[in-house]
């Protein structure tokens, strides 16, 4: 572990000030799922009391959502040392078996789920945008393989706004899943370099999934992977289309709350764009923990190894919406959308931004 990460591990005061904000810790109620406990475990590894293999399962029980980092009163960064511990585990060969399998799938198929076949609805919609245009709609592995209707709806929204765009027949992985699983490993960077080469064929890349947008705009830059094309988030692009009048506002009569994806609000500092789009179609209200203080609502990748916890994380976020009297949550993250939809309940409607715009 680098001296900087060791400093962050050892400087954690175990003060608990970040405890209440951890979506995993809140869902499990277990002390081991807090940033504080993870720092304590890694501190014991650094001191030679434990080996990394003793605490590695715990290192993968973190969403790397950054809520604790934002909340840390003393300015320490639990995400930084968690990601570094993952990279160390990969290099030491002590990754959990479940994580090894997901990494192998990422390398073999480009997605952690090991999927190679796409849904017919996606295939048909994408085929209509196979021709090369200046703008690329980058959909991401979750939308392509796990929630194809989200891909189709994203295309419909851009069609509605009269945008001429391409969708790649075989979209390369952005590297976001490997970045989450093993951080700055060579394999991650190789995926990113290959992806950047594809993106650079276009003038502008509209990124549908906030998980991809985060790595394109942050890790690619940090690791010297150059994207020459202009990269814009789907939400920011929709706000721009609305402002230009290409996308027409239509009041749905709904009153909704917006679930900020942490990748947009905390990592990229984007909070107003989605709200301006939502406000053109519904009354946009706020729930507990929003904007940069957002509470993560689960994802599809972590569901692979902790499905029950992810279901509870999503159920907790629905409870947050209920507590302010909201009956509709609008999401801008395909992964959070799928997580929230997986909760068996009828009181709060879960809508994607695309569904709101299309009136579905
Ligand atoms: S990054 Fe998120 S999931 Fe991980 S410890 Fe911090 S608050 Fe919890
Ligand atoms: S990460 Fe920061 S806020 Fe959380 S327990 Fe450590 S010192 Fe306290």
Image: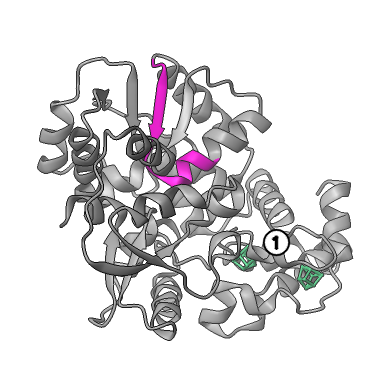
- Mark 1 surroundings: few (<14), some (14-19) or many (≥20) residues within 10 A: some
Location of ligand 2 given as a quarter of the image: bottom right
Judge by depth and name the residue closer to the eye, 243 or 80: 243
| Vertical comparison of 167 with 20: above or below | above
Number of numbered discs visible in the structure rendering:
1
Picture quadrant of residue 119: top left
Quarter holding the C terminus?
A: bottom left
Asked if the magenta segment contains residue 308, the reply would be no
Q: Is residue 23 visible?
A: yes
Asked if the magenta segment contains residue 204, the reply would be yes
Query: What colour scheme does the image use?
Result: one colour
| Vertical comparison of 320 with 307: above or below | below
Residue 189, percent from left and from top: 57, 30
Which residue does the numbered mark 1 point to in the structure image? Answer: 70
The residue that appears at 50% across and 55% down in the rendered structure is 99
Q: Is residue 48 visible?
A: no
Task: Indicate yes or no: mark 1 CB to ligand 1 under 8 Å.
Answer: no
Element marked by disc 1: helix
Extent of the magenta region? 202-214
| Vertical comparison of 347 with 171: above or below | below
Picture quadrant of residue 242: top left
Q: Is residue 247 left or right of residue 101?
A: left
Judge by depth and name the residue closer to the eye, 97 or 297: 297
Q: Is residue 241 left or right of residue 129?
A: right
Residue 179, percent from left and from top: 56, 43
Residue 310, percent from left and from top: 43, 71
The residue that appears at 21% across and 61% down in the rendered structure is 252
Residue 25, percent from left and from top: 59, 77
């Amino acid at each position: 572990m680098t001296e900087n990460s060791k400093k962050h591990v050892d400087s954690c005061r175990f003060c608990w000030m970040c405890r209440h904000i951890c979506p995993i810790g809140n869902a499990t109620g277990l002390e081991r799922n807090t940033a504080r406990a993870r720092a304590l475990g890694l501190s014991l590894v650094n001191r030679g009391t434990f080996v990394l293999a003793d605490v590695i399962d715990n290192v993968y029980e973190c969403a790397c959502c950054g809520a604790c980092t934002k909340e840390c009163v003393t300015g320490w960064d639990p995400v930084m040392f968690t990601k570094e511990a993952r990279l160390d585990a990969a290099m030491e060969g002590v990754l959990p078996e479940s994580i090894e399998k997901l990494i192998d799938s990422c390398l073999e198929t480009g997605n952690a789920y090991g999927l190679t076949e796409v849904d017919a609805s996606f295939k048909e919609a994408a085929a209509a945008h196979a021709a090369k245009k200046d703008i690329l709609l980058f959909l991401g592995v979750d939308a392509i393989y796990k929630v194809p209707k989200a891909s189709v709806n994203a295309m419909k929204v851009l069609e509605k706004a009269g945008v001429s765009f391409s969708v790649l027949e075989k979209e390369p992985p952005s590297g976001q899943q490997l970045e989450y699983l093993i951080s700055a490993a060579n394999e991650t960077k190789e995926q990113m370099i290959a992806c950047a080469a594809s993106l650079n064929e276009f003038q502008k890349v509209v990124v549908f999934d906030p998980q991809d947008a985060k790595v394109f705009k942050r890790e690619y830059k940090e690791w010297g992977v150059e994207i020459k094309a202009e990269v814009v988030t789907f939400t920011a692009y929709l706000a721009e289309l609305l402002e230009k009048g290409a996308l027409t506002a239509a009041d749905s009569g709904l009153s909704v709350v917006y679930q900020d994806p942490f990748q947009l609000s905390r990592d990229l500092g984007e909070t107003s764009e989605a709200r301006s789009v939502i406000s053109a179609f519904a009354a946009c209200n706020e729930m507990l923990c929003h904007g940069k203080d957002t509470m993560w609502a689960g994802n599809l990748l972590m569901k692979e190894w902790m499905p029950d916890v992810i279901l509870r994380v999503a159920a907790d976020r629905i409870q947050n919406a209920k507590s302010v009297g909201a009956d509709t949550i609008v999401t801008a993250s395909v992964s959070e959308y799928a997580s929230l939809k997986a909760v068996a309940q009828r009181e709060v409607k879960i809508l994607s931004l695309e569904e709101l715009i299309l009136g579905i």
